[in-house]
Image (cartoon, rainbow, N blue to C red):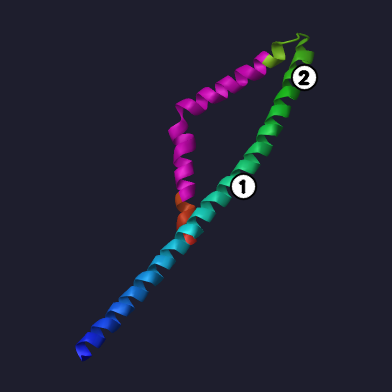
């Protein structure tokens, strides 16, 4: 009888441990996903604000260059060419300029979170 009681106590302890461990893992997943979602939302908000600023700044620059050069569409062509040049630079250097920095920042955030 004592052996059965001990086995039952051990089984109950293991069950409680498994339940507690499951709850802990569930809370850690919620914590990590909330970090990711909040980071994405804040980045999205800042990105949209910067995009609107870039749009209006580009329109201003295009109109200014058109007025300065006294040609109706040349300012828009210059601004468009500038963005094409920037896009090509980013395209051919995306690994070094974008991907490695994003990975490094992600790893730093996760390592800082564990400390």
Q: Residue furthest top?
A: 71
Horizontal side of residue 95 vs 56, given as left or right: left
- Examine the rendered structure and indicate whether residue 68 appears above or below residue 19: above
Q: Which mark is residue 23?
A: none
Magenta stretch: give its range: 77-106
- Residue drawn at 46 percent across, 55 percent down: 110
What secondary structure is the magenta-colored segment mainly? helix
User: Which sits earlier in the primary sequence, circle 1 or circle 2?
Assistant: 1
- The picture places residue 102, in percent across and down from the top left corner, at 48, 43
Counting other residues with Cα less than 10 Å from the Cα at mark 1, is it few (<14), some (14-19), or many (20 or more)?
few
Q: Secondary structure at mark 1?
A: helix
Q: Nearer the viewer, residue 100 or 49?
A: 49
- Residue drawn at 70 percent across, 11 percent down: 74
Task: Give the residue at mark 2.
Answer: 64
- Residue drawn at 50 percent across, 54 percent down: 33
Q: For the residues marked 1 and 2, what is the alpha-carbon distance in whole angstroms?
A: 33 Å
Q: Secondary structure at mark 2?
A: helix
Quarter of the image for residue 50 reads top right
Query: Does the segment drawn in magenta span residue 37?
Result: no
Q: Which corner quadrant holds the N terminus?
A: bottom left
Q: Residue furthest front?
A: 1
- The picture places residue 78, in percent across and down from the top left corner, at 66, 16
- The picture places residue 27, in percent across and down from the top left corner, at 47, 63
Q: Which mark is residue 42?
A: 1
- Residue drawn at 44 percent across, 40 percent down: 100
**Nearest to viewer (mark 1 / mark 2):** 1
Q: Nearer the viewer, residue 5 or 20?
A: 5
- The picture places residue 106, in percent across and down from the top left corner, at 47, 49
């Amino acid at each position: 009888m004592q052996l059965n009681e001990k086995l039952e106590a051990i089984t109950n302890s293991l069950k409680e441990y498994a339940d507690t461990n499951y709850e802990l893992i569930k809370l850690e997943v919620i914590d990590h996903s909330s970090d990711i979602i909040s980071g994405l939302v804040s980045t999205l908000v800042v990105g949209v604000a910067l995009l609107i600023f870039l749009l209006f700044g580009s329109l201003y620059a295009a109109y200014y260059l058109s007025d300065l050069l006294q040609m109706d569409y040349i300012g828009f062509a210059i601004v468009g060419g500038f963005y094409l040049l920037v896009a090509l630079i980013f395209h051919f250097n995306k690994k070094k300029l974008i991907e490695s920095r994003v990975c490094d920042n992600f790893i730093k955030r996760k390592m800082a979170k564990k400390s």
